[in-house]
Image (cartoon, helix red, strand yellow):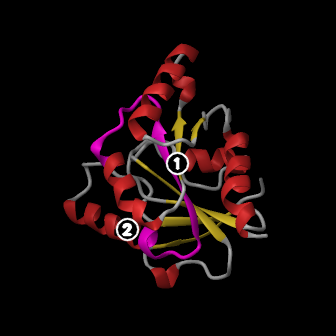
Amino acid sequence: MKMQFIKSATKPSEYPEGFKYEVALVGRSNSGKSSLINALAQQRVAKVSSMPGKTTLLNFFDAGDYYRLVDMPGYGFAQRSHGDQKGWRNVVETYLATRELLAGLVLVMDIRRDWSEDERDLLSWIAPRGLPVALVLNKGDKLSKSQVTKRRTLLKEESGLDMIWMTSALKRSGVEELEESIFDLWIKPRIR
């Protein structure tokens, strides 16, 4: 996929103009959202750090002719000040609540992490918008195949989500299928 960084933003007046649908990547800090974007792009377009909490802005990326990906700040990282965390929450909530072009939400989780109150709250908060939500269990290369199967079954049950993809941004496994599904299920029906 040809992908390029467009801009960063913190408020609606800074969002990119033009009519392209957007798919937001949300998740806990250090779940691999930026790495997943790089795997989708097949090149480094998003900044990646081993330090959780590196992404602090909404980062918009053109993902071809019809849509954009939005890399969002991660949640659950406690080493930042309370003011920083509140500011980032406002940035994320404003975008999720008001962006008309938002076509769906990809919740990226490190497959080794447990489903938590943070994920439950996010799904409850976004539910009134009626947007599709998919769960991406990333870092699948860190576990054996049997462990991956067990974790997928458990997290599917706990999340209640039907759309679940297994990926490894590092090895690019499952990435192409994810991109095709996002386009076919969320974007293509909107551009007809």
In the figure, 14 relative to 164: above or below?
below
Residue located beneath label 2 in the image? 93
Q: Amino acid at mark 2?
A: Glu
Quadrant including the C terminus: bottom right
In the figure, 66 relative to 37: above or below?
below
Query: Where's residue 81, x and y in %?
Result: 22, 59
Q: Amino acid at mark 1?
A: Lys
In the figure, 91 relative to 181: above or below?
below
Residue at x 52%, y 48% (from the top left corner): 33
95 and 182: which one is in front?
182
Residue 128 occupies which quadrant of the picture?
Answer: bottom left
Farthest residue to the bottom: give it: 13
Residue located beneath label 1 in the image? 33
Which mark is in front, 1 or 2? 2
Residue 61 occupies which quadrant of the picture?
Answer: bottom right
Is residue 63 shown to the viewer in this render?
no
Query: Where's residue 102, x and y in %?
Result: 56, 68
User: Crowding near pointer 1: few (<14 within 10 Å), some, many (20+)?
Assistant: many
Q: Considering only order in the chain, which callout, 2 or 1, is on the residue closer to the N terminus? A: 1
Q: Is residue 122 magenta?
A: no
Residue 6 occupies which quadrant of the picture?
Answer: bottom right
Query: Where's residue 153, x and y in %?
Result: 48, 26
Residue at x 49%, y 45% (from the top left corner): 108
User: Crowding near pointer 2: few (<14 within 10 Å), some, many (20+)?
Assistant: some
Instruction: Give the magenta part as a residue range.
Output: 95-118
Query: Where's residue 172, x and y in %?
Result: 68, 36
Is residue 100 shown to the viewer in this render?
yes
Alpha carbons under labels 1 and 2: distance apart:
18 Å
Res. 86 mark: none
- Secondary element at tag 1: helix
161 and 46: which one is in front?
161
Residue at x 57%, y 25% (from the top left corner): 141
